[in-house]
Amino acid sequence: MRIPFYQFNPETFSFIDDPVLILEDFWSAEERRQFRLAMERATWTSLTDMPAVAQAFPNCGNWLKADIGGPEASHFLERVGMPCIANYIESFPNIKNRHVNFNFYSYKAGDCLPTHDDTDDAYTYAKGRKPPTRRLALATYFHEEWHPDWGGELIMYGPPANPGQQTSLQVTHCIPPSPGSLAIFAVPRQHRVCRVDALAGEQKRLSIAGWFMTEH
């Protein structure tokens, strides 16, 4: 479903019936400004300084990742914690714990993320622990403007026509990183972030992305 946020009913929407939700104008201009200010204060880590992640996602440029500060994290979770998300998470049996994991991301020209389905958290396993199960993935955008020529789209695919062969994937959604928009989708689902084009110049694709998760 793709719908303006003011028309959306979070009480009746179901991720079981429609596993991809795209909300336009989810954030106000002032909220986006406050998150950008928080990003300016954040301490960023580049992909090259995350060896396990860089190994899992090679040839992706050198995008940046940062933790979200306390006040901004609280406001973010308060806003995105909609009933449709809770209903979907609670539909899974035998839950021991519920987890969230969200970070700031900054993509410049040349940065991208290849096709994956969010199920193989290899770099978490590398730390010697089993990660929670990702149930819903989220991406939302805070840059002030974004032009179609600048790339950075979130591409989603349906199930492969031939299981195990990525060449048989069919595009189901092409989601531009429109300022203030929010995309949430059920995991697993093959998806990728298109490379930010050189036409973006010095503009950065600023986002928050992560997951709602369960532990069993």
Image (cartoon, rainbow, N blue to C red):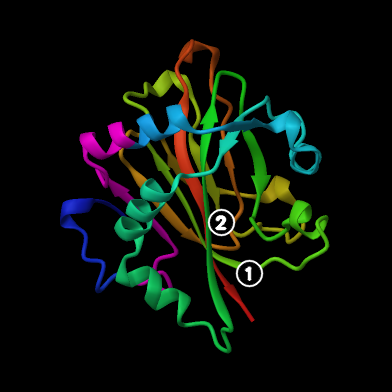
Q: Residue at x 30, y 56 (%)?
A: 79
Identify the image quadrant of the N terminus.
Answer: bottom left
Q: Is residue 141 visible?
A: yes
Of circles 1 and 2, which is in front? 1
Q: Residue at x 62, y 29 (%)?
A: 63
**Residue 15 painted magenta:** yes
Q: Is residue 1 visible?
A: no
Q: Furthest residue to the left? A: 6
| 212 shown above or below 167 | below
Residue 161 falls left or right of residue 42 = right
Q: Give how far across and how far down residue 152 sits, in percent.
A: 50, 30
**Residue 9 painted magenta:** no
Q: Secondary structure at mark 2?
A: loop
Question: Which sits in the foreground, 127 or 146?
Answer: 127
The kind of residue tagged 1 is: Thr
Compute the Cα span from label 1 to label 2.
20 Å
Q: Residue at x 68, y 61 (%)?
A: 119
Residue 162 falls left or right of residue 108 = right
Q: Furthest residue to the bottom? A: 94
Q: Give how far across and how far down residue 183 sits, in percent.
A: 40, 50
Q: Which residue is mark 1?
A: 133
Res 55 → quadrant: top right
Q: Residue at x 36, y 49 (%)?
A: 71
Res 160 → quadrant: bottom right
| 184 shown above or below 81 | above
Q: Which residues are magenta?
A: 14-34
The kind of residue tagged 2 is: Gly
Question: Which sits in the foreground, 106 or 40?
Answer: 40
Residue 155, numbered label: none
Residue 158, numbered label: 2
| 183 shown above or below 64 | below
